[in-house]
Amino acid sequence: MGEAAGQGKPRYTWADYQTWGDDRRWEIIGGDAYEMSPSPTSRHQRIVGELHAAMHAWFRSNPCQLFIAPMDVVLGEEDVVQPDLLVVCDARQIRRTHIAGAPTLAVEVLSDSSLHRDRLLKTDLYARHGVKEFWLVTPWPPIVEVLLLREGRYEVHAVLGRDQTLASPSFPGLQIPLLAIFDFPLEPGEELPMPGEPPAPRYGRPDG
């Protein structure tokens, strides 16, 4: 994803967004427009697909609904995003073209091009708009950070490596073994972490 296209220009809104063509994907954060990458990496897509498959099986028997990107989430007039995965528990939020308001759970799979936006801008954005639970998934080294909203700020509920199981605090019973999620070929120079090895340090501050 590229840099903000709207910095130094008039602030963009959901009304503006709806006039843009479908040939390019955008997000709006604080009135600034960010163009999304035309094609995520194969590793990114594999992780999103595996997470969706694991979550879909569980949410089939749950009244909340699971969505996968691209799906517009309108948090405010100047905040329109497309999380990689999201869960909505209020059916009134589900519109034909978008989700109106904060989902209960949002998931972002990080990439080098979107690291600053997903880890800093979106963490602050989701907290301000009341997204109860937020997962930050780092493909390499394989880490999932589970953030839980408390008094308007995110607290780190868990930091998990590939040999552990993710258990959602908001959805008791939703458990995802991460070994299957991070089961992809390694690139030259990559080495699997030892079982039980603590996850690598996180980039930046996850608490917004």
Image (cartoon, rainbow, N blue to C red):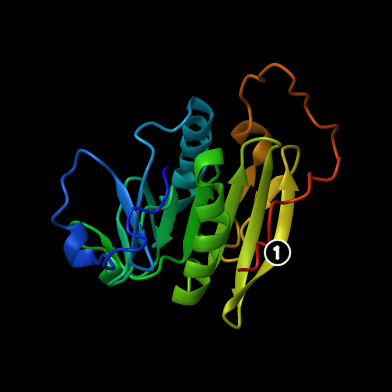
Q: Is 64 placed above or below 48 here? A: below
Identify the residue at horizontal 51%, vertical 34% (top origin): 44
Q: Quadrant of residue 185?
A: top right
Give the SS element for disc 1.
strand
Classify residue 118 as left or right of residue 18.
right
| Residue to which mark 1 is pinned | 157
The three-letter code of the residue at mark 1 reads His
Residue 47 screen position, x and y as percent: 53, 35
Whether residue 174 is visible:
no
Q: How many marks?
A: 1
Neighbours of disc 1 within 10 Å: few (<14), some (14-19), many (20+): some
**Residue 56, located in which quarter of the rendered image?**
top left
Residue shown at 84% from the left, 45% from the top: 198
* Left or right placement of residue 86 versus residue 151 in this view: left
The N terminus sits in image quarter? top left
Residue depicted at x 84% and y 34% = 195
The residue at the far bottom in this view is 151
Q: Is residue 189 above or below residue 138?
A: above
